[in-house]
Amino acid sequence: MPYTIKSITSPHNDEIKQLARLVQNGRERRKEGVMALEGIHLTQACLETGGRLRRLYVNERALQHPEVQDLLRALPAGSVVASLPDAVMAKASAMATAGELLAICERPTARPAPRDASRLLLEDIQDPGNLGTILRGAAASGLREVYLSKGCVDVFSPKVLRAGMGAHFALNLHEQADLQAELKGFEGRKLVTYLEGSASLYSQDLSGPLAFVFGNEGAGVSPALLALADARVRIPMPGRAESLNVAMAATICLFERVRQLEAPLTR
């Protein structure tokens, strides 16, 4: 067995108090350079992509769960796993019901991207569900480079991680990015979704290097970024809906790009 198990039974244990701070406080996670993963799927995704676990906490009722057993067998030799009663796990968890396990993993460091690599630029996205869904769509569409402004919600918060469903581990996430500088330096087309004076998304050639820009749920894309765009595009809506939320709009744009890459636009 490559790991050893130690039992922690008190919710007042200092390690549990620190665990709760890491799960529930973004500033604490950033200071420690970690993210908190809740559940089997996210932890598996982290391990499968070479992520480094600092500590793993398993709900004692889940120790014999087949998927938990598989995950434990994949741990590096010498790993220490903490077994927690359900009540102690609930003390640290960010979920309404404590899951099978909780892992503290090192936060990945973004790698420099080629200047012509297609990318997604996100300005001040505030809703964790929206951000996680956008990341999931980016990963599924094959786009790897994502730049997030300083005003975005913490991309490694537990809610964003859960909504992303493992997408974080397939992406190169550039936090606290200067989006204006990134757009100016990008060697490709720059598209912004915008209603006024815009062209249909489906009239655009999306097959080359491309930067998609999406803005805040309420304010949209800032004038400074709009000014840097090569094209303003809208998603045609022949029905009665007034608008689409940013996660839906981003997903449609990303997969129109996929469609064109598989069947190039003819003019």
Image: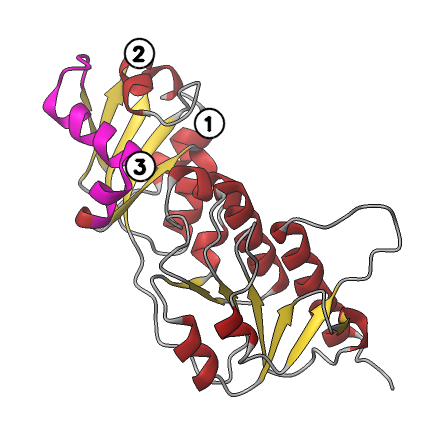
Is residue 117 left or right of 172 when viewed as pictured? right
Seen from the viewer's position, the closer of residues 253 and 76 is: 253
Q: Is residue 119 visible?
A: no
Q: Amino acid at mark 2?
A: Ala
Is 164 within the magenta? no
Q: Secondary structure at mark 2?
A: helix
- Residue 39's x, y, as percent? 43, 32
Q: Is residue 27 above or below residue 100?
A: below
The CA distance from mark 1 to mark 2 is 22 Å
Query: Marks 3 and 2: CB-CB under 8 Å?
Result: no
Q: Is residue 229 above or below residue 29?
A: below
Question: Which residue was labeled with disc 1?
Answer: 66
Label number found at residue 87:
2
Seen from the viewer's position, the closer of residues 214 and 258 is: 214
Q: Amino acid at mark 1?
A: Pro
Determine which quarter of the picture holds residue 87. Answer: top left
Question: Which residue was labeled with disc 3?
Answer: 103
- Residue 161's x, y, as percent? 44, 43
Q: Residue at x 53, y 80 (%)?
A: 228
